[in-house]
Image (cartoon, rainbow, N blue to C red):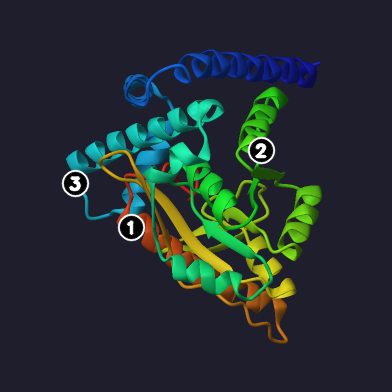
Amino acid sequence: MVCVSAYVQNRGVSEWRWRAFKLMQSIVERLPRSWAYALAVLAARFAWMFSPLARPRLDYNLAIVCPELTPVELRKLSWVNFRNHAKAYADLMMLPRMNVEAMRPLMHVDGLENLAHARAMGKGVLVVSCHMGSYEVASAIWSATVSPVSLFAEELEPRALFEWYRDTRARLGISVLPLHLGGLRKVTQALQEQELVITAIDRDITGTGQLMPFFGRPAPIPMGPAAIALRMGTPLLPACVYRLPDDTYRAETAPPVIAQPTEDPRADEVRVTQELLRHIEGFIRRHPEQWHVPHRIWEGAP
């Protein structure tokens, strides 16, 4: 009886979340970009001030990433982080009326030669990143100009919200591959067809990650990208997307990580993942105001 009650309650919360999102989205997509951002920043102010868990968890994570900051500096960083994430949500909500040609002038790319190098291997490219920036913009442009793009990401609840994300991204040429076994098969197929697949390793969503040093403290880290690269020979491309002060975006890539297998597959996965994490840590250290992860990454978080 308790389980049934909890299920009904969670379903009710999910349905409310979907209705609230769709109402806000229907408003935002009709607004000029500057107005949509202004509304998003207003909502971010309330969320930053009154969120019972999101802000404390984000503050905890940022304090680990930037231990040199004073409490006042950390408070300012936390607010700017919330503001940037709210603008990213506004970007997502405006997608139904956007097109690639309108997005193209908004994107600047550093390290295109790294992407070209990875693609030249002819085995697809597994882009490995973190929860930062407006990836839909970069993915849509890459899909239209480089090759088909797939996002390997968690399924959202309720189902209607996930379907909206999937269908909106599909209109821009972006496939969404759910983070489960069936989705993993599609990832393999996409890479065999020399597509770009984007995923993140800074948060263990499935609960199957291995404890590894992340900013000097043990955190569960997904090993899947390294395992795929070692099995298929696919190059791993560390990358991030972040917002510039004028609300355009910059995509930054590092040289590809080429996974070389040895006789110890588990040690290989750890070694390759550690190399990826060094790049991810660099992205986050350079742009902590963009890394929005209000979740438990390390033990001791709220």
The label on residue 58 is none
Within-10-Å neighbours for mark 1: few <14, some 14–19, many 20+: some
Secondary structure, mark 3, is loop
Residue 294 visible in the current orientation: no
Front: mark 3 or 1: 1
How far is disc 3 from disc 2 in space, using C-alphas? Answer: 43 Å
Q: Is residue 108 above or below residue 232?
A: above
At 39% across and 32% down in the image, what residue appears? Answer: 87
Residue pushed farthest front?
A: 101
x and y percent of residue 16 in the render?
61, 14
The quadrant holding residue 263 is: bottom right
The label on residue 70 is 3
At 44% across and 55% down in the image, what residue appears? Answer: 240
Q: Amino acid at mark 2?
A: Ala
At 26% across and 41% down in the image, what residue appears? Answer: 77
Which quarter of the rendered picture does the N terminus lie within?
Answer: top right
Q: Which residue is mark 2?
A: 170
The quadrant holding residue 273 is: bottom right
